[in-house]
Image (cartoon, helix red, strand yellow):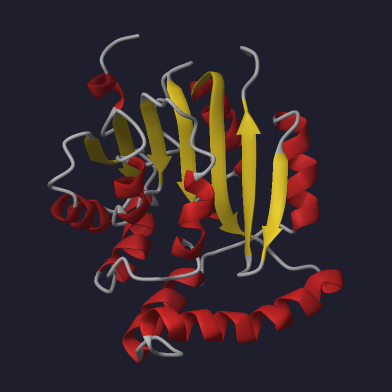
């Protein structure tokens, strides 16, 4: 394949891109890389990054908090996000990391190189895009023995409602221990509420059904703070 620069900065021509960017730009003003439901699982994800690891792709890097962790585990990290504001923050906060490349890109139209990455990671991004289409892109872009790591949100089923209720006090305790407050300021809550208006989620049953067809041997695990993880190793070329 050619140089990695050939695959960067590929934006979609879809007229909705501006709206999507605005939806992600809005929370960027309040991004401080502090504790949240996603960062709580950073350590868990890092344990599954293969070693040694040369090339890593992060899809939906936000302000780069996890990207900087990846930079300590891989030779090169390519991080994509559709939000110009998020990428601006990520570059600003990651200047000391010479092995990270941040690019503004819509993952749906970005040209994924084939059989290239040792690890592909996405946090709280897949629920914004067609699941099967994105998983196929990631699957093809992994090298043999490469690892796909996903952390995302799901729609709780009626049967799992008790677990969700039980997570509320755990969330409050963790929130206070890590941030010394129980709730975000009103302006932060408002920004994320506006962002969430366009979110849709699959149930874990739906996720497992779709993912097992595309990713044989995939491991999907439900986590306490309204997240699931997906771990898959590509054992053969497709």
Q: Please give left or right for residue 133 compared with residue 54 in the image.
A: right
Q: Quadrant of residue 72?
A: top left
For the residue pair 145 and 140, the one nearer the viewer reads as 145
Could you tell me residue 233's position as x and y percent?
62, 28
Q: Is residue 180 above or below residue 16?
A: below
Q: Residue at x 45, y 86 (%)?
A: 176
Q: Please give left or right for residue 213 compared with residue 110 in the image.
A: right
Could you tell me residue 174's position as x and y percent?
51, 79
Q: Is residue 153 visible?
A: yes
Query: On the rendered image, what quadrant is the N terminus found in?
Result: top left
Query: On the rendered image, what quadrant is the C terminus found in?
Result: top right
Q: Residue at x 73, y 49 (%)?
A: 207
Number of callouts = 0
Could you tell me residue 195's position as x and y percent?
43, 70
Q: Residue at x 65, y 14 (%)?
A: 236
Q: Quadrant of residue 186?
A: bottom left
Q: Quadrant of residue 28?
A: bottom left
Q: Is residue 186 above or below residue 30?
A: below
Could you tell me residue 179's position as x and y percent?
37, 82
């Amino acid at each position: 394949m050619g140089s990695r620069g050939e695959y960067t900065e590929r934006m979609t021509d879809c007229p909705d891109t501006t709206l999507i960017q605005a939806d992600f730009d809005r929370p960027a003003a309040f991004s401080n890389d502090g504790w949240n439901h996603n960062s709580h699982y950073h350590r868990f994800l890092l344990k599954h990054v293969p070693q040694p690891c040369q090339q890593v792709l992060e899809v939906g890097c936000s302000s780069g908090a996890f990207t900087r962790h990846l930079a300590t585990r891989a030779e090169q990290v390519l991080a994509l996000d559709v939000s110009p504001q998020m990428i601006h923050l990520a570059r600003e906060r990651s200047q000391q990391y010479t092995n990270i490349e941040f690019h503004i890109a819509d993952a749906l139209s970005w040209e994924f190189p084939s059989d290239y990455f040792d690890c592909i990671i996405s946090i709280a991004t897949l629920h914004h895009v067609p699941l099967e289409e994105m998983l196929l892109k990631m699957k093809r872009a992994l090298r043999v023995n490469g690892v796909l790591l996903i952390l995302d949100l799901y729609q709780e089923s009626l049967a799992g409602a008790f677990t969700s209720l039980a997570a509320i006090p755990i969330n409050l305790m963790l929130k206070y221990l890590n941030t010394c407050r129980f709730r975000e300021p009103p302006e932060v809550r408002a920004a994320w509420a506006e962002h969430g208006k366009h979110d849709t989620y699959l149930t874990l049953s739906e996720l497992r059904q779709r993912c097992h067809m595309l990713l044989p041997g995939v491991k999907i695990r439900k986590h306490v703070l309204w997240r699931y993880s997906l771990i898959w190793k590509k054992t053969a070329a497709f």
